[in-house]
Amino acid sequence: QVQVVESGGGLVQAGGSLRLSCAASGRFRSINTMGWHRQAPGKQRELVASITSGGSTDYDDSVKGRFTISRDANTVLLQMNSLEPEDTAVYYCNVNGRNVFFVEFNLWGQGTQVTVSS
């Protein structure tokens, strides 16, 4: 079984920084893509950033130049700088991989609140 545990988040003023961390643990064959999504009130969940096992990254246009995603084995970090009130949302970690039976899985963390005050 695979567990996804997030940490970080909180309240910060506009222009400030926060860092989110997510770790995948348990029994699995491989972890492929790890990423962060967010969901603001009344809006759909959207991709913020992702990183593959090979280190390739993808960012939403709204966070390019401000957010940086990085990865160390099965832990992914999201460094968020120059935060704006529009970044306020619940942030969810997503982990894609294969279990010991080579079956693909796609798991979500419990979510962590990020609030940016103006």
Image (cartoon, grey):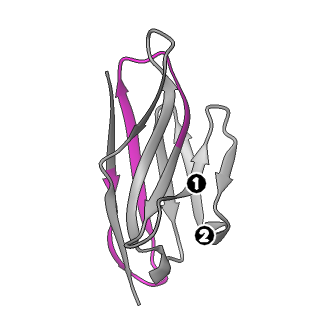
Rendered view: 53 above or below 65: above
Mark toward the viewer: 2 or 1: 1
The residues bearing labels 2 and 1 have C-alpha atoms spaced at a distance of 11 Å
Numbered tag placed on residue 118 in the rendering: none
- Label 1 Cα neighbours within 10 Å, binned few <14 / some 14-19 / many ≥20: many
* Residue at (44, 11) in percent of width and height: 100
User: Residue 88: x, y in percent?
Assistant: 41, 74
Q: Is residue 91 magenta?
A: no
Asked which secondary structure carries label 1, the reply is strand
Query: Is residue 65 found left or right of 69 in the rendered image?
Result: right
Query: What is the magenta segment's predominant secondary structure?
Result: strand
Which image quarter holds the N terminus? top left
* Residue at (49, 76) in percent of width and height: 83
Rendered view: 106 above or below 11: above
Q: Quadrant of residue 101?
A: top left
* Residue at (47, 74) in percent of width and height: 87
- Label 2 Cα neighbours within 10 Å, binned few <14 / some 14-19 / many ≥20: few
**Residue type indicated by callout 1:** Ala
Q: How many marks?
A: 2
Which residue is denoted by mark 2 in the rendering? 66
Task: Write the start and end of the magenta stretch as one range.
Answer: 7-34
Asked whether 66 or 95 is in front, the reply is 95
Give the mark nearest the N terminus, 2 or 1: 1
* Residue at (47, 37) in percent of width and height: 95
Which residue is denoted by mark 1 in the rendering? 49
Which image quarter holds the C terminus? bottom left
**Residue type indicated by callout 2:** Arg
Q: Looking at the image, do the residues carrying marks 2 and 1 touch, with CB atoms under 8 Å apart?
A: no
Asked which secondary structure carries label 2, the reply is loop
Q: Quadrant of residue 55?
A: top right
User: Residue 69: x, y in percent?
Assistant: 57, 52
